[in-house]
Amino acid sequence: MPRLTILDGGMGRELKRIGAPFSQPLWSAQALIESPKHVAQAHTGFIDAGAEIITVNSYACVPFHLGEALYAEQGAELAKSAAKIARDVVAQSQKDVLVAGSIPPVFGSYRPDLFKAQQAFEISLTLFQAQNDYVDIWFAETVSSIAEAEVIAKVLSNTDKPCYFSFSLIDDNEHSARLRSGELVTDAVKVLIKHNVAAGIFFNCSVPEVIEQAIKDVNQALELTGTKLTIGVFANSFTPIKSDHQANGTLQQMRNFSPEEYLEFAKVWYNLGASIIGGCCGIEPSHIQALANWRDSLEES
């Protein structure tokens, strides 16, 4: 089995949990604007829990969350600041931790129906350029369609750093795993292989129950093509998300998995081949600590 690497948890909900300024529509960008110390505190909490990768808090540095005017005025600078904070926290920790730059969904999470390719490219490129000097690897987060992945692949073709594409899945257990767009995970794998940019395929901001089938489908597609990609997971603690979800509406209802419950899912993912595991919305340092303790036990055995 490959060595297990531990990713951090969900930044937005963690900022809310530790008392940072937090409201819609700004989401995790509000702390970045009003209280950067809370962003550093959240990163530190995940590193102290055992995370070996932390993700830049740039998820909400897009017009969808900031609004058009604030994005035009400060969007790039906020993303750059978020990357600097992450890099500084790692330096202060004196631990061997990677910083992952984040390319988020431009038009809101889980809404492939709102996607506009040219605008997405321009905004994603801006976020890429703002963060690139400070990051070690790249995550395209919560990708909901193949069209989104292809645009981000074009943006990330500008770097030699490892790039990981993380897809969000329809939250129900079907025979084949599907992206929020309804497209098959196996087709997404083929597209990543075609573009030759991705070092790995991840699944995030989906309920844990649908991840197992997605990994099985990835394994099948990779076996057929003779290709190798790193597989990773950072699932959420939400109730299932509907296709018409309004990301800037009311907060999604949580299920609050315990660290032990989340760990049981993670063990299944690891045994299927996932080698990087963390968490998304609602997954806290306590969950990451449980994952890290398990990682340590694997290395000792």
Image (cartoon, rainbow, N blue to C red):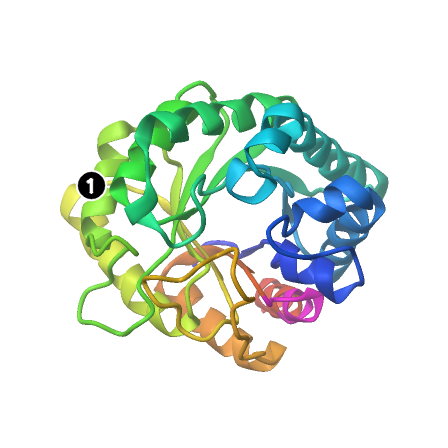
Of residues 135 and 41, the one drawn nearer to the viewer in this rendering: 41
Residue 131 horizontal/vertical position (percent): 61, 27
Quarter placement of the C terminus? bottom right
Segment tinted magenta in the rendering: 282-290
- Depicted 162 relative to depicted 187: above or below: above
Indicate whether residue 289 is drawn in magenta.
yes
Residue 248 horizontal/vertical position (percent): 52, 55
> Which residue is at 60% across, 62% downward?
299
Amino acid, disc 1: Lys
Disc 1 target residue: 190
> Which residue is at 26% across, 37% downward?
147
Picture quadrant of residue 99: top right
Magenta-highlighted stretch: main secondary structure?
Answer: helix
Mark 1 is surrounded, within 10 Å at the Cα level, by few (under 14), some (14 to 19) or many (20 or more) other residues, namely some
Q: Is residue 87 left or right of residue 283?
A: right
Picture quadrant of residue 91: top right
Of residues 53 and 18, the one drawn nearer to the viewer in this rendering: 18
- Depicted 19 relative to depicted 175: above or below: above
Determine the secondary structure under disc 1.
helix
> Which residue is at 65% across, 71% downward?
290
Indicate whether residue 18 is drawn in magenta.
no
